Structures are given as structure tokens and as C-alpha cells.
Image: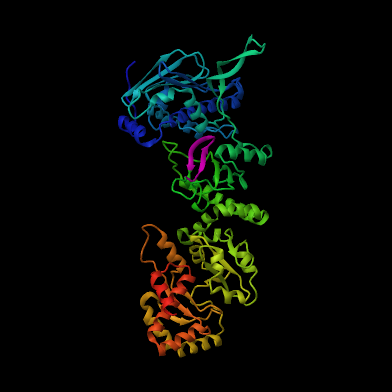
Amino acid sequence: MAKKEFKAESKQLLNLMINSIYTHREIFLREIVSNASDAIDKLHYRSITEADIPLSREDFRIDISIDPEARTVTVSDNGVGMTVEDMEANLGVIAHSGSLDFKSTMESVDDVDIIGQFGVGFYSSFLVSDRVTVRSRPYGQEQAWEWVSDGADGYTVGECEKETHGTDVVMHIRDDLEDEDYGRYLDEYVIEDLVKKYSDYVRWPIHMQLERGSMEETGETDEEGNPKREWVTRTEDTVVNSMVPIWQRPRDEVSDDDCRAFYREKFRDYEDPVAIIRVNAEGAVSYRAMLFIPRVAPYNFYSRDFEPGLQLYSSGVMIMDKCKDLLPDCFRFVRGVVDSPDLSLNISREILQHDRQLTTIRNNLEKKIRNELARLLSEDRESYEVFHSNFGTQLKYGIVDGFGAKAETLRDLVLFDSFEKGSKITLREYVDAMPEGQERIYYASAESIARAKQLPQAEQVRDRGYDILGLVEDVDEFAVRTLREYDGRQFCDISGNDLGLESDEERKDSDAREESEREVLDFVKDVLGDRVESVRLSRVLKTHAVCLSTVGDVSLEMERYFSSIPGGPEDVRARRVLEINADHPAFDALKRARIEDPDRAGSMAEIMYAQAVLIAGMPMDDVLDYSERIFGLF
């Protein structure tokens, strides 16, 4: 038989496909099994539409056999088979798809679904093989044909003997290299695992001859009369794929307990999920999905090692183990599978070609997940709070991410600590409980809720009967600042410069009083220098002498956060304001000292500032100087 050249870009194109397009060599088996499934689909379709083909669904199968001595892996099907013309068209032309042609011309018939693109996926066999032989006999014909190729140099086609219709793909596995163990593909357990990983849900049974061992009685007894047992190994014909995925089965055939069991086994979680989302969508893009909202976070969830994404299938064939494009980052904790026959794939099933379909699925799933979380929050608060304790931080980061692109989607799903309730509440619950006259949503940022409640600024707010949200996570303040407002109410940091608690007349009185004490305040500012933006009489303090507030976009909590990041920005500093309670005895003592003993007054100003820093929970620049000044007052 004369060797023929490949049509198309020949050697360069084949080398490109083998070395560049496929990033994981193990997918060769997925591709060849998918082609075998396609061949059976074609004959099954004909058996439905042509009365003279006496075949039923139960007659079809795929077989995988391994010969370690010959170094071959063979995938056989009893599908439609190929004529010599088919071989020329499908195997002699790189990037030609016989399955694609068939799908475009066949009538719409249920239970027929072509998942492969025979021409290109077939060539993935050369990822692990140095020679590939295809023997095929078309259904209804006596003559079989053999196609043989060592790679990009070309191929031969000739007559051969084959007892049954269908196709055998015989892959001669390459010799091992120093950095590549090709021989592992001659291990039946490796091949079985690859079938379960990539082709578990192919609709036709995949058979392998596998060794199975068990303890069996020998027929003899020991000295005490007990039957003897020995380990016996037998080779058994075994169906290694499950064929019908749980998400493809009718809803009334799959209970929630079935789904939970599937989740625990599939995703190796010892806890049941808090929610299950099942989707059967038909329309512009048809797909099925089974999603799970976990109860607890994986140990590495908030690390760089965590890989988000849903398992992506096309008609039961796994395309990606973790497809990130199917989930927005705010819902990266969701686990599950998506299966769509509408996902078109280009020359590799690892590269999704039509982003429009993925985007449509992603948008739909985002709404489903959001609605399910809202339902859980409303109907099962206890479970939701368990979920939120693990993944609430992710939802809040989702608000901040993308300059608030997902803020509206997520704002009703996040919880914050309530000073008054002593528990977690939503922003809706806070606003609904606001008393008449309250115009802002007040919050306090600190490392703990107990520490937040100790902030002096909280006194006046709480005396008005207003609740305060305790923001105790690093991301909390960034989240509320991204939101800016909720239901028309602005967020207000109680450590900010203006809490909006004074009437116009009270504000005028406060301004006048502050102006009357200008000399004292300027004196303190001169002592503190650029450590503070300004010094003013406080309009929020009641029993405490001093506090720190800020002006501008950077709060004290933000300053602390950025300073805690190794290698983080050093110039992120809050513009500090020292507030002094004019009704506190300490202020009267300061005023007298400024006149009678300016040096002592300077020390008092330093102590006031240091006290305010301590109360705010910020690090003190010079603890020793603070201690000496305290003792210097005695």
C-alpha cells in the first residue's frame, strides 16, 4: 500500500495540534471514546429510522483492551463503521468532522446526540502513540478497511479482515522518556480511572476485562475444622462507566438525599450542603445543572491554592474539571456540574469556542444562586448563618470587587453585627428597625464587636436610640463604602467627623463655642504638629475626655489594615482629628495649664493625644515617652 500525504497543512498542523492544543496527554482516551460513542449514535439513529436494521439500544457497546506486551491500547465499538471513502474523508483530512457533518444533516430524533468531532479529536491519539491503526467495517458490508499512520508523515489505507461491523482504534504506546511515563497508559487501573474521570457519563456501556480479587473457600478445612480461604483473582468483563448522570435523570427519580450523597462522594465533603440547585434550561442555550452551596469552607478556600469552578460536560463527556467562566467570583464557593449539548468545541475539547453560550449559562446560574441564598436566608436563618460564617467574607469581597459591579446583587445577602440585637442582621433588617428621625446607617469599625462597643463616639448615637453596625472584618468597611447607601440612607462611620446628629441651631452653638476656645485648640495643634489634621471640640463625646476621628476617605481601620499587609503601601494614612470634650474636667485643666505652665500644658496635650490613640486601638508611636509624661504629672 502506498503511503498517502495528509490533506490540509500536513506535518506542521498535526505537530501543532499534538504539541500545543492539548495540554493534558491523558485526554486522548476521552477523545477516542467519544468518537466511538458517535459511531454508535449514528447506527442507533439508523436503527430507529430504518426498519431493516434489527438492532436495539441494548446491542451497542464500547470495549477497551490493553496488551502490555505489545504496548497497545485498543478502543472498539460496534457502531456504523467506515468505508474507505469515510477513512479518506475523516482520517485523511485534519480538522474534518464526520460527526459534525452527520449532525448537521440528520433529522431531529430523541436519544441521539453527537458529542464528537471525529477528525480532530482522533489525532489526540498521537499524544501517547507512535503508531495508530484503525480497522473498520461499515454496517451491512462485508469488506473491512485498515488505516495506519506513524504521524505527520502520512498514512496508508487498505483492505483487511474484521468479523463484525464497527471500528477498532489500536494505539501503539510510545516508549518511555526520562520526563514522560507513557507506559502508565498500559495499566488497566489508570485506564479505568481515566474512563471514570472523563467518560463516566457516555451513554453507551464501556467494557473492560479487569482483574478482580476476593477471598474464597478452597473446599478444605484447617485442623479445627474451619473452612480454608485464599485470595482468588479473576478477570471479569466489567462495565466501568455509570452512563446516566444523576443530573440528567428526571427530578421525581432523584431525591434530595440522593443529591446530597452524590455531593459528598463527588466533591469529597463530609458535610451536607446547605442548599441544592437543580436547573433544566431549554431555549437559546439548553443545559442541565446541579449546583451545591457548601455548609463549610474547604481548608484552603481563602488561599491562592483554591481552584474555583464548576465541572463542565458536553452530553456526558467531561470538558473541564473546573470551569471558572461559569461562576462569578463572588459565588466561587459553589460546587457542581453543568452539562450542555449546545456547547460547541473547536479542535480541542479543552478550548471553548463560543463565549456567548457560556455567558448565557453564567448569567442564569448567577441569578439561580442569588435567589437560592435569599430563600435560605428567609426560610432557614440558622443554616444561612452557618453558611455566612464560612462564606460571608467572600460575598463582601464580591461587593468591593469590580468597583461594586455586583453590589446590588449581594447587598441583601451580607450580615453584620448589631449593637442592639447582639446578633447578625441584614441591611434590610437594620433599616426596617430604624426609629423615626434617624437618617443614616451608623457603623463602627474595630477588630472585635466588644472593642467597637467601647468606642467613645458610640455613646451619643446609642443614646438617641440608634443601632450601630459592628464592622469587624477587614473587608467590612470597604464593602459599606462601596455601597455608599442602602434604601436611600447613607452609611456613616461613627469615627468620622460629622455624625449628622445636631440640628442647625445646635450646630451654630457648637461652632460659636469652638471659636471661643480657638486659642486652646490652636495651642494643642501646634504641640501635635502634623500628627493630626486638626484639633476641635467634640460634638459626640459625653463622658469621655478625648477621641480620634478622621476626615477624608481613609479611616483609622483602613490605615490599620494596610499597615498590616507585608510589603503593603506605606503612605495610606488617615487624616486624624483630635476631638476634646469641652465639658470634661481635663479640658478645664488644660486651659489653666496653658496660661500658668505652658510646658505642663504641652505634656497634657501629648497625653490627651496618646489616650485618644489608645482608645481608637491604634499603635502608639512612643510608649516610653507616654509613660514618662504620665508620671511627670505627679
Quadrant (top left, top right, bottom left, bottom right) of the N terminus: top left
Which residue is found at the position 44% from the left and 32% from the top?
A: 27
Q: Is residue 356 left or right of residue 213?
A: left
Residue 65 rendering spot, x and y as whole percentages: 48, 20
Say which quarter of the image contains residue 436: bottom right
Residue 593 rendering spot, x and y as whole percentages: 43, 87
> Furthest residue to the right?
252
Quadrant (top left, top right, bottom left, bottom right) of the C terminus: bottom left
Report the label total. 0
Residue 297 rendering spot, x and y as whole percentages: 54, 48
Q: Is residue 485 visible?
A: no
> Furthest residue to the front?
634
Residue 244 sits above or below residue 338 on the image: above
Residue 358 rendering spot, x and y as whole percentages: 49, 46
Q: Is residue 109 magenta?
A: no
Say which quarter of the image contains residue 154: top left
Residue 273 sits above or below residue 96 on the image: below
Which residue is found at the position 53% from the left and 27% from the top?
A: 42
- Dominant SS of magenta comes to strand
Q: Nearer the viewer, residue 370 or 382?
A: 382
| Colour option used | rainbow
Q: Which residues are magenta?
A: 307-322
Residue 436 sits above or below residue 451 on the image: below
Say which quarter of the image contains residue 83: top left
Q: Nearer the viewer, residue 71 or 501?
A: 501
Q: Is residue 308 magenta?
A: yes
Q: Is residue 420 visible?
A: yes
